[in-house]
């Protein structure tokens, strides 16, 4: 048997109405359908909801990325980062300042101005040694001159 949900029942289920959820859980999901007018009402309500941003964020967390379009063309993407590292990677990947810094660094390395791995780690060890022995202050004074 096919069950056509109306807008009120669908919203009640979304809002966690126990009686509605219990009834829907007892049905075969393949037997539950929405008609075009109900789907249109739900989409309209979501677009003009006072909780529009919250609704989009919840959908993004549950379903993955959401592509936002204008006149049929993608203009933005809404992503829910997995953790802080993922967020940092996403932000840096799209940062013009960070990308410019990377480009400048790559050009410097290609121009022979980079440090070898060995030189880099020797410099790190030297600076750590200076800090440990208290010579950091003398280095700071040299910079101020």
Image (cartoon, rainbow, N blue to C red):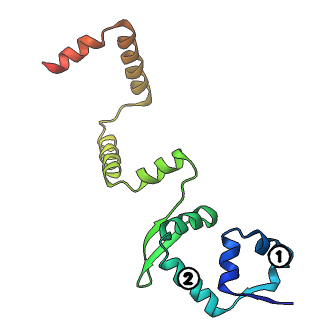
Q: Quadrant of the C terminus?
A: top left
| Callout 1: SS | helix
Is 144 in front, or is 19? Answer: 19
Which mark, by number, is residue 23?
1
Location of residue 91 with respect to 133 vertically, above or below: below
Cα distance between the residues tagged 2 and 1: 24 Å
Residue that carries the numbered disc 2 in the rendered image = 43
Q: Is residue 84 left or right of residue 95?
A: right
| Callout 2: SS | helix
At x 52% / y 45%, what residue is drawn? 84
* Residue 1, picture quadrant: bottom right
* Residue 123, picture quadrant: top left
> What percent of the width, then of the height, locates residue 71?
41, 85
For the residues labelled 2 and 1, say whether their Cβ atoms are less than 8 Å apart: no
> What percent of the width, then of the height, locates residue 9?
70, 81
* Residue 129, picture quadrant: top left
At x 33% / y 35%, what residue is drawn? 114
> What percent of the width, then of the height, locates residue 64?
59, 65
At x 37% / y 6%, what residue is drawn? 133
């Amino acid at each position: 048997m096919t069950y056509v949900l109306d807008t009120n029942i669908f919203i009640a289920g979304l809002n966690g109405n126990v009686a509605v959820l219990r009834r829907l859980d007892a049905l075969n999901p393949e037997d539950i359908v929405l008609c075009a007018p109900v789907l249109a009402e739900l989409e309209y309500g979501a677009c003009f909801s006072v909780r529009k941003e919250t609704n989009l964020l919840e959908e993004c967390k549950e379903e993955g990325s959401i592509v936002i379009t204008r006149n049929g063309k993608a203009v933005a993407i809404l992503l829910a980062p997995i953790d802080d590292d993922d967020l940092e990677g996403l932000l840096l990947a799209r940062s013009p300042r960070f990308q410019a810094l990377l480009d400048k660094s790559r050009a410097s390395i290609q121009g022979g101005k980079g440090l070898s791995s060995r030189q880099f780690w020797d410099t790190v060890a030297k600076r750590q040694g200076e800090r440990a022995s208290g010579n950091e202050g003398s280095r700071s004074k040299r910079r101020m001159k």
